[in-house]
Amino acid sequence: MIGHPLGASGAIKIAASALAIKHGIIPPAINYEHPDPDCDLHYVPNESLKRDLNCVVCNSFSFGGKNSILILRKYLN
C-alpha cells in the first residue's frame, strides 16, 4: 500500500504489526479482486477486519536474499 521504503521497510512492518495488536485490526490486502479457486486461504481483501489479536507474524524479505521473521505477542500482565 505504501510502496517499498527500502531500509525502513522492516521498521514500518514492525510498527504496523504492533499497532495491529494494540488496536485489534487486521490490515487488508489491497487490490484483491479475483480469488483463485485452487487456493482456498482466508484472505482479508480490501477492507480491514476487527479481531482480538494476541500475536502477529511479521515477515521481511529484502533485495539480495536477506530474510527475517519476527513474532510479536501481546503483553499480558
Image (spheres, rainbow, N blue to C red):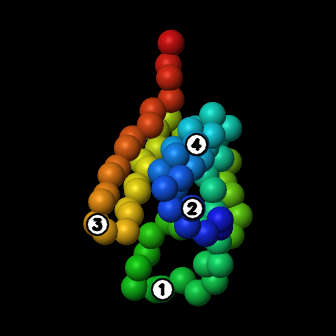
Identify which amino acid the numbered label 1 is placed on. Answer: Asp
- Mark nearest the camera among 3 and 4 is 3
- Identify the mark at residue 48; answer none if there is no mark: none
- Identify the mark at residue 65; answer none if there is no mark: 3
State the separation of the CA atoms marked 2 and 1.
Answer: 29 Å
Q: Please say if 30 is above or below 61.
A: below
State the separation of the CA atoms marked 2 and 4.
Answer: 14 Å
Residue receiving disc 4: 15
View extreme (front): residue: 7
State the separation of the CA atoms marked 3 and 1.
Answer: 28 Å
State the separation of the CA atoms marked 3 and 4.
Answer: 22 Å
- Mark nearest the camera among 3 and 1 is 3
Question: Sequence order check: which comes first, mark 2 or mark 1?
Answer: 2
Identify which amino acid the numbered label 2 is placed on. Answer: Pro
Number of residues whose C-alpha sits closer than 10 Å to that of mark 2, classed few (under 14), some (14–19) or many (20 or more)? few
Residue in the foreground of this view, choosing between 59 and 10? 10
Question: Sequence order check: which comes first, mark 3 or mark 4?
Answer: 4
Q: Is residue 63 visible?
A: yes
* Quarter of the view holding residue 23: top right
- Mark nearest the camera among 1 and 4 is 4
In contact (CB < 8 Å): disc 2 and disc 3: no
Residue drawn where x is 40% and y is 56% of the image? 60
Q: Please say if 22 is above or below 20.
A: above
